[in-house]
Image (cartoon, rainbow, N blue to C red):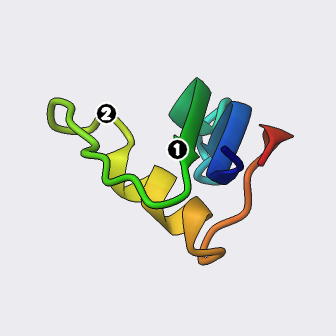
Amino acid sequence: MTAAVTFDRVEKTYKPHPLARTGILAVRGVSLSVPQGCCFALLGTKRAGKSTLLKMLLSLATQTAGAG
């Protein structure tokens, strides 16, 4: 069965504040494959990157590493 959604080691780092040295890592190394016709749930604690992952799925945010 073909996949409707595929992420392979996807990462997202937001640009740092001008006074900060490093960026904010929102998603680190997520791999996900959802077959067509299937439902899935995205569960996690606060600040785990769930919203950022969905934004990347909808092309509202660009990933900084990985394929998907």
Element at label 1: strand
At a point 55% along the width and 47% down the height, the residue shown is 35
**Residue 27 vertical position relative to residue 4 in the rendered view, above or below:** above
Q: Which label's residue is closer to the chain start, 1 or 2? A: 1
Report the mark closest to the observer, 1 or 2.
1
Residue 18 in the image: x percent, y percent?
A: 66, 53
Measured in 3D between alpha carbons, the distance from the residue under mark 1 to the one under mark 2, in whole angstroms, is 20 Å
Q: Which mark is residue 34?
A: 1
- Residue at the outermost front position: 1
Say what amino acid the circle numbered 1 marks. Answer: Val
Does the rendering let one see residue 25? no
Kindly indicate the quadrant of the structure image that contains residue 11. Answer: top right
At a point 35% along the width and 57% down the height, the residue shown is 51
Residue 34 in the image: x percent, y percent?
A: 52, 44
Question: Horizontally, is 20 left or right of 62 in the view?
Answer: left
Q: Are marks 1 and 2 in contact (CB under 8 Å)?
A: no
Number of residues whose C-alpha sits closer than 10 Å to that of mark 2, classed few (under 14), some (14–19) or many (20 or more): few
Element at label 2: loop
At a point 66% along the width and 31% down the height, the residue shown is 22
At a point 26% along the width and 38% down the height, the residue shown is 47
Q: Which mark is residue 48?
A: 2
- Residue at the outermost left position: 45
Residue 16 in the image: x percent, y percent?
A: 63, 47
**Residue 6 vertical position relative to residue 29 in the rendered view, above or below:** below
